[in-house]
Amino acid sequence: MRPDRVLLIDDEADFLEILSERMRSRGLEVRCATSGAQALRIAETETFDAAVLDLAMPGLDGLETLRRLHEVQPDLQVMILSGRATVKTAVEAIQLGAIDIFEKPTDVETLVERIRAARARRLAEGDRATQGQIDEILKTRGW
Amino acid sequence: MNAPSGSPKLQREGLRFFGQIAAGLSHELSNVLNIINELAGLQQDIAGAATDDARGAQAGRITDLAGRIRAQIERAEGLNRRLHAFAHTIDSAAVAFDLADLLDLLEALAARAARLGQVELRIHRPTTPITLQGDPFALLLSLYAMIELGLAAAASERRLSLDAEPASGGARVTLESADPLPPLEEPGSVAPALEMGRAAWGATITSDGGRETETVVLSLPAIAPTHRSENDAPREGSHET
């Protein structure tokens, strides 16, 4: 089975470097982006089971990045990992499809566990979508 | 520190600026702490991988040090959260907030002064939610001034408690001191900070003594009068950091 693939997005390069090393040592395949724009470029050519996204970033902020990531990969499971998410921002993030909100600092084991669960969830959603398409074909073709 | 000078609008803008910069610095500090936290975690990971070899003892020491680094990070994070919350109290002069949240912040901010003054300070959250609308910074200023009053008067007993309860649609906040408090009836006896906050909230201050404890009571309306028209709306540039 291939390793879980995660895209880490945070404008703090040092933070990304260390967190990605810790995640790799736990068997994850990790790609890093230091801006929302870079994350979108990566997401256009590679698929991920999950993305871990900071909110306060220069340029495209976390919420806008989240919205655009879902345009590129609608089934991407996005988790917010932020320093100070307000209730308002957290609600907006959930409305935009984020599955989890974590406040820094977060235990890496918890994060990895949630990424693994996110992959299972993504696969289940994919199965449901495929089943829906099959049902639709069976109905319209009258087989 | 000298009192800020200039018009009320300038003072308010100055505070807004102060809050914005403090919140930004707090955010940056948080970023640094997060990196140190991950470094400590990585150190633990490396030490954990080395426990089976001959360097197990050193690995144990590294793990121990990493744990101590983490404990200090948690402490710094707690302080930083308070700084951040304090910086944001200046964001709006007319906002709805839960009094219990403000009292939590007050307790955190006043803890150091109480500790340095060797005074036992207890701040109790109200048992039911109390929503107030107005300037949280002005109220924080008043409540802190009440505590300072008690700290300055601390003598043999050195015990203070602050309680809040719903009253007349608003709230009543009571500071109780085991030591005698100065009479508030005398002109100029109310600290300027307490008076400014009282005026901003249209609140009343009363005191009562002569029993085993002495009290100062701040009675607040649910909605503060909006007499600072240029500042009533959420301020431009209110920051989310």
Image (cartoon, rainbow, N blue to C red):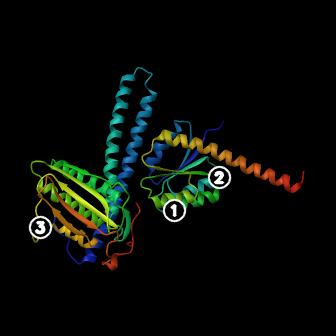
Residue, disc 2: A75
**Whole-percent x, y for residue B64 in the image:** 35, 31
Say which residue label 3 marks: B189
Residue matched to label 1: A60
Say what secondary structure mark 3 lies in.
Answer: loop
Left or right, A92 with reference to A72? left
Q: Label 1: chain? A: A
Residue B167 position by quadrant: bottom left
Residue A79 position within the rendered picture, expressed as x and y whole percent measured from the top left: 54, 50
Picture coordinates of residue B199, whole percent (x, y): 24, 73
Residue farthest to the right?
A: A143
Specify few, some or many for label 3: CA neighbours under 10 Å numbering under 14, 14-19, or 20 or more.
Answer: few
Q: Between A29 and B175, which is closer to the camera in this rendering?
A: B175
Q: Nearer the viewer, residue B125 or A4?
A: B125
Mark 2–mark 3 distance (CA, rounded to whole Å) = 65 Å
Q: Tell me the element at label 2.
A: loop
